[in-house]
Amino acid sequence: MSSEETNKKNRSFVGGAVILGLAGLLVKVLGAAFRIPLANIIGDDGMGYYQTAYPIYVLFLTLATAGIPTAISRMVAERYALDKPKAAYKVFRVSSLLLFLTGLISAGILYFGAGAVTRMIKEPDAVYAMQALALGLIFIPLMGSYRGFFQGRQNMRPTAISQFVEQLFRVAAGLGLAIYLLPKGLPFAAAGASFGATAGGIFGFICIGLIYLANRRTIAAELRLDNSADEESIKSILWTILTIAVPITIGSSVMPIINSIDTAMVKSRLISIGYDSDSARALYGQLTGMAAPIINLPQVFTQAVSMSLVPVVASAFKRGELDFMRKNISLGLRYAMLIATPCAFGMMALAKPIMLLLYPRQQASAQSASACLAILAMGVIFLSLVHATTGTLQGIGKQHLPVIDLCFGALFKIGVNYFLTAVPALNVKGAAIGTASAYLVAAILNLWHVSRFTGTRYDYVAIFVKPAIAAGCMGALARLSYELFHRFAGNMVSTALAIGVGVLAYVVLVFATKSITMEELENMPKGKRIAGLLRRFIR
């Protein structure tokens, strides 16, 4: 492989991660723009109907898709690596039919079984919200097959665009229908809000379908040039999809299951050291409802790194280009750390100001929850490593290993939670330590497995030390800036200015420590323009 081809492929990986990360950020912002006004429109009772239906819909959606888009991405990438676009296209057609059927069956079960389910959980008026979500189970899984196909071709733009369109129509339709149906009663308003997910799925599918049609001529040309024989049966393709997808689905279910166990364990351990039921519930709410959601934002970018790594690693592994593969693995880990480390140090340095900024009307709870945020922030670093290494292991066909490693982490979390939550000085902070330690265990095991099965030798200074130095200095400067600004301004202004100082300081420190070079920056989307601007200030 020539150096020009190698650089092109590296740009594909980095550019894809940036595109998916930015799209994920926009989706998160739009999600917040949906939940907050929706709660004001339909109130607690209406949100009760909505929240009764939505988790069940998510469960059905998980079962309907079952990690198949990731499987498609890897299988398509492997076949393109062997110059077999016909085989890749066959994977796409078979998986599309599979996802359509699973989605159709799931939609039917959810729609016609909604009445029985809502009566069983004693929320019969939530039946309309549940039925409004059912149709989305046809379109969203099918959209996943198109996303997986384009990702396998190392084109992340269709996924990013369709994600944005899906969320945009979800917000617009959901809020619009909630307002329109509110006079008919809260159950119908909640159903209108729920139908937003279905509308988003429909328009997201239309969007990616149009993108596919726009690329149809290019795909057809690739197929005409492929003279290879059709060696794979539909049965073998389905079996391969399932062997990849099932472990991914199991892995995505591990932490939610453990978190469900936590709900009972943490409260009971808090009660065992003298807290009453209401106080234990309040502390657990500070951890899971106030602190935990904040650490989800950095995951948008590290998950984008993971998704972009799968086809790149799979393609290189299939071609036997191991040096190129190892280079991308190291690059993925380094970029994950460059993203996660400043987020972690920044949240640790400004934990209390951030919590007070987000929850100004609940100052006592916000201050109490800030300690949990500071602990969970460290878990961001470990979780980003889990994401990056999971993408690598999935790419080389070892998708079962991240599941096993996460199970070990989850077991460790249960033990830590049980003992530390019962320490009065720690109380609910013990559960936060348990969560961070679970990701640490899983990250260490994943790193070991990646090294063992790919032969990757980690440059610890470049991957871990340099980003930590830059992020540590940034965190200290952000905290000092906050203390200085807070003498003259309120918490909101002081926090915003401190974050701004931290961001600028980190940019300078990243280049000062050579954690990233200008040449690497230029390989990113719009990187040459950004590098040109930075060169005016950084010599």
Image (cartoon, grey):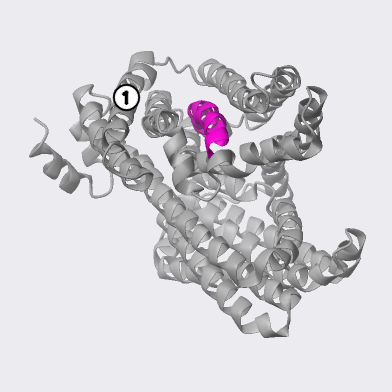
Q: Is residue 110 toward the left or the right of residue 334 in the image?
A: right
Question: Residue 19 location in percent, x, y?
Answer: 38, 50
Instruction: Estimate the x, y position of residue 26 in percent, counting from the top left.
Output: 43, 56
Q: Dot 1: what SS? A: helix
* Quadrant of the drawing holding the N terminus: top left
Asked whether 533 falls inside the magenta stretch, the response is: no
Question: Can residue 304 be seen here?
Answer: no
| Rendered location of residue 174, percent (x, y) | 59, 72
Which amino acid, by three-letter code, is at mark 1? Ala
Percent position (x, y) of residue 348?
44, 29
Q: For the point 70% across and 42% down, which residue is it?
A: 249
Query: Magenta residues?
Result: 366-391
* Whether residue 199 is visible: yes
In this rendering, the answer to whether 10 lies above or below 19 is above
Tell me what residue is drawn at x 64 percent, y 21 percent: 426
Name the one closer to the observer, 484 or 86. 484
Which residue is rendered at x = 34% and y = 14% of the image? 461
Give the dominant element type of the magenta stretch: helix, strand or loop: helix
Disc 1 crowd, CA 10 A, few/some/many (<14, 14-19, 20+):
some
Where 282 sits versus 124, above or below? above
Q: Which residue is mark 1?
A: 476
Q: Is 370 within the magenta?
A: yes
Give the quarter of the image for residue 274: top right
- Identify which residue is drawn at 26% across, 29% down: 516
